[in-house]
Image (tube, grey):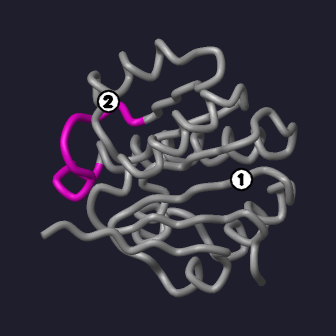
């Protein structure tokens, strides 16, 4: 099932591409929400994005420092709960149509790490209004996401 207005950036520098779109749309007076997964809070981005409010709003749910794969089992369980909270918040944003563009930074890693079940993913995409733009970023693109996307960009650097 294709999802209208679903764009995927994967590979390298994908966050920069997505944030560029956020600045563009925010500059046009449209509302943008960015929800970041799996990254220790990038203060550089956070400080800059806070200056773009109210058009661009930045949300970060991860609490642990470091890469998810390097966390202890207890820390992974806590981050799984934080990730579920972020997914639920994103679903609420879509259901209530709170923004024109929703960016889920590193969401592809949530899918890759199987932190969201297929049925839950189906329900998640059904919550998205057609007119809302949704951008997903991450390092790896799973086929189940590729099939749904309207546009896919594989970004590499030389």
Q: Residue visible at 54% across and 49% down? A: 104
- Residue 151 quadrant: bottom right
Q: Earlier in the sequence, mark 1 or mark 2?
A: 2
Q: Residue visible at 52% across and 33% down? A: 23
Count residues near mark 2 (Cα–Cα under 10 Å), then give few for <14, some for 14-19, many for 20+. Answer: some
Q: Main secondary structure of the magenta part?
A: loop
How many numbered markers are drawn? 2
Q: Which region of the structure is painted magenta?
A: 62-73
Count residues near mark 1 (Cα–Cα under 10 Å), then give few for <14, some for 14-19, many for 20+. Answer: some
The residue most toward the left is 158
Give the percent coordinates (x, y) of residue 115. Answer: 49, 63
Cβ–Cβ under 8 Å for marks 1 and 2:
no
Q: Looking at the image, which is closer to me, 110 or 100? A: 100
Quarter of the picture containing the N terminus is bottom right
Q: Is residue 89 magenta?
A: no
Instruction: Using the image, tell me which numbered label, if any, was put on residue 82.
Output: none
Element carrying mark 2: loop
Which residue in the protein does label 2 denote? Answer: 41
Q: Is residue 66 magenta?
A: yes
- Residue 96 quadrant: top right
Give the percent coordinates (x, y) of residue 124. Answer: 74, 60
Whether residue 51 is situated above or below residue 87 in the rendered picture: above
Instruction: Using the image, tell me which numbered label, if any, was put on residue 133.
Output: 1
Q: Looking at the image, which is closer to me, 81 or 50? A: 50
Quarter of the picture containing the C terminus is bottom left
Q: Residue visible at 21% across and 49% down? A: 67
Give the percent coordinates (x, y) of residue 157. Answer: 19, 66
11 left or right, relative to 19:
left
Whether residue 144 is situated above or below residue 78 in the rendered picture: below
Give the percent coordinates (x, y) of residue 79. Answer: 40, 44
Q: CA distance from mark 1 to mark 2?
A: 24 Å
């Amino acid at each position: 099932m294709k999802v209208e207005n679903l764009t995927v950036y994967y590979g390298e520098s994908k966050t920069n591409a997505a944030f560029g779109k956020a600045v563009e749309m925010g500059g046009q007076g449209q509302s943008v929400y960015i929800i970041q997964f799996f990254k220790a809070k990038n203060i550089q981005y956070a400080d800059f994005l806070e200056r773009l409010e109210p058009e661009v709003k930045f949300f970060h749910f991860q609490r642990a420092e470091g890469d998810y794969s390097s966390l202890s089992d207890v820390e992974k369980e806590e981050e799984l709960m934080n990730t579920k909270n972020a997914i639920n918040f994103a679903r609420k944003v879509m259901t209530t149509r709170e923004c024109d563009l929703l960016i889920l930074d590193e969401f592809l890693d949530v899918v890759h790490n199987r932190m969201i079940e297929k049925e839950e993913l189906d329900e998640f995409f059904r919550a998205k209004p057609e007119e809302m733009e949704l951008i997903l970023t991450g390092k790896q693109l799973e086929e189940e996401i590729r099939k749904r996307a309207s546009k896919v960009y594989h970004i590499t650097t030389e």
